[in-house]
Image (cartoon, rainbow, N blue to C red):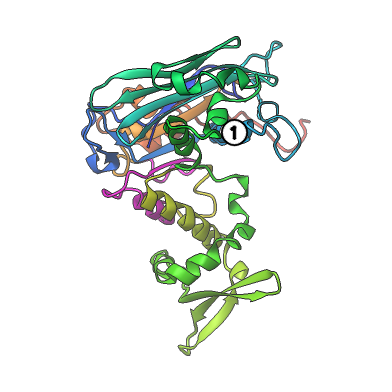
């Protein structure tokens, strides 16, 4: 479960910025919107991030995506473009002369422990790296390791087993990725690696590419068609059946609709609306997240979706039997309402005239009890809106 994600000097986020999924104790509204794991703190099931075009909200999504990719590619240190991982995914703030290091850090809860892991890097080396573990029952915090440009300090729990290997870690390789590849008695590295790579679902920019259905949809149709059709009926697509046919090495999907004569008529899946196809893609990822207690971050979730369908998908994550989380960016203010969201669930990204993006929460503002979140947001009270100026298409006379 995601607790916090922090970035610094990445794209438009020059200063340290933290997305915090910890609920604010003072807020008593919408308790069902929270995850209760029996600790003092409760956590948000859903966080919505609003902002103008080019404000930087998608850069938050990219930060988490590139954080994952660096970890995944660090050990082999070559990605598909032939570059080192830290070079390929080094995107410091652009509007300064001196390019400084980028930092990422994540805090997650796994099996009764809170893990904090992060690293600082540039295009040539890992400058620092750290990992800590805290027991949620005893509140005891221990160092797993701390790394600087010159040395790696191993905590007592792994020192004996890992001491011989630490000098073998290249300067451009993450210790987490290195130790995860070794066969060790300790499971701390595989636990943290898995928590980052497997329990964080960060769909790529190909998320809307319908070709992604080909490797996964046949299995879903074969094993759980009934649940998929139930979802498609629930969102009013008119689809009564879905199937596929294989020809050579290709797969062709089709749906069926009922005509006025009560007969069923086939339609190629890719002739369905873009919203329907995107809904199926979202269903596949959301179902995985909810059933396996994962955290999903989607950029522009609202695109091609009706506001009521957007709410329908968000409501799927308010499952009291799951610790799944949904984080999404959006322009759609329809759901920015106290009827649906707590104040700590609503976030804004604002970019200033010098290109610096800042992330803030509605909970950072004094909000009247009778305030309309959407109305005040569109009026500029909370920031995160475009600063429009007078403009005319015609040339001045």
The residue closer to the viewer here, 40 or 95, is 40
Q: Position of residue 181 (x, y in %)?
A: 56, 35
The quarter holding residue 312 reads bottom left
Instruction: Please provide the residue range marked out in magenta.
Output: 308-336
Q: Position of residue 27 (x, y in %)?
A: 24, 30
Q: Determine whether, in the image, residue 112 is placed left or right of residue 392.
A: left
Instruction: Residue 323: say if magenta.
Output: yes
Can residue 158 be seen?
A: yes
Can residue 59 be seen?
A: no
The residue closer to the viewer here, 168 or 104, is 168
Instruction: Residue 162: say if magenta.
Output: no
Q: Secondary structure at mark 1?
A: helix
Q: Which residue is mark 1?
A: 66
Q: Does residue 177 sit above or below 228 in this rendering?
A: above
Q: Position of residue 383 (x, y in %)?
A: 47, 26
For the image, the number of numbered tags is 1
The quarter holding residue 30 reads top left
The residue at 30%/39% (across/down) is 338
The residue at 54%/68% (across/down) is 218
């Amino acid at each position: 479960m995601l607790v916090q994600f922090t970035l610094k000097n990445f794209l438009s986020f020059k200063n340290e910025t933290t997305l915090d999924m910890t609920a604010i104790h003072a807020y008593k509204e919408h308790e069902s919107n929270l995850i209760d794991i029996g600790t003092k703190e409760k956590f948000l099931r859903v966080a919505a991030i609003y902002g103008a075009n080019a404000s930087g909200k998608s850069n938050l999504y990219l930060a988490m995506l590139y954080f994952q990719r660096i970890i995944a590619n660090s050990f082999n240190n070559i990605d598909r473009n032939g570059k080192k991982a830290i070079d390929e995914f080094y995107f410091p703030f652009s509007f300064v002369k001196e390019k400084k290091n980028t930092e990422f850090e994540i805090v997650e809860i796994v099996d009764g422990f809170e893990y904090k892991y992060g690293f600082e890097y540039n295009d040539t080396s890992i400058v620092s790296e750290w990992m800590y573990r805290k027991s949620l029952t005893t509140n005891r915090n221990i160092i797993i390791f701390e790394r600087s440009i010159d040395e790696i300090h191993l905590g007592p729990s792994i020192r004996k087993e890992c001491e011989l290997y630490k000098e073998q870690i290249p300067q451009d390789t993450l210790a987490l990725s290195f130790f995860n590849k070794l066969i060790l008695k300790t499971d701390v590295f595989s636990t943290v690696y898995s928590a980052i790579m497997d329990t964080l679902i960060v769909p790529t920019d190909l998320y809307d590419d319908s070709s992604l259905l080909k490797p996964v949809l046949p299995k879903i149709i074969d094993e759980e068609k009934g649940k998929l059709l139930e979802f498609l009926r629930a969102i009013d697509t008119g689809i009564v059946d879905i199937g596929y046919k294989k020809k050579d090495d290709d797969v062709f999907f089709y749906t069926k609709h009922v005509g006025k004569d009560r007969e069923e008529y086939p339609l190629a899946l890719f002739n369905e609306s873009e919203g329907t196809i995107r809904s199926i893609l979202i269903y596949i990822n959301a179902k995985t997240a909810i059933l396996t207690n994962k955290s999903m971050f989607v950029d522009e979730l609202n695109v091609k979706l009706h506001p009521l369908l957007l709410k329908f998908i968000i409501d799927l994550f308010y499952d009291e039997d799951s610790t799944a989380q949904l984080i999404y960016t959006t322009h759609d203010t329809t759901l920015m309402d106290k009827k649906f969201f707590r104040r700590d669930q609503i976030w804004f990204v604002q970019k200033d005239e010098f290109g610096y993006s800042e992330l803030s929460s509605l909970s950072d503002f004094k909000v009247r009890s009778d305030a309309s979140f959407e109305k005040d947001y569109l009026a500029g009270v909370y920031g995160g809106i475009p600063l429009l100026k007078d403009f005319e298409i015609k040339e001045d006379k």
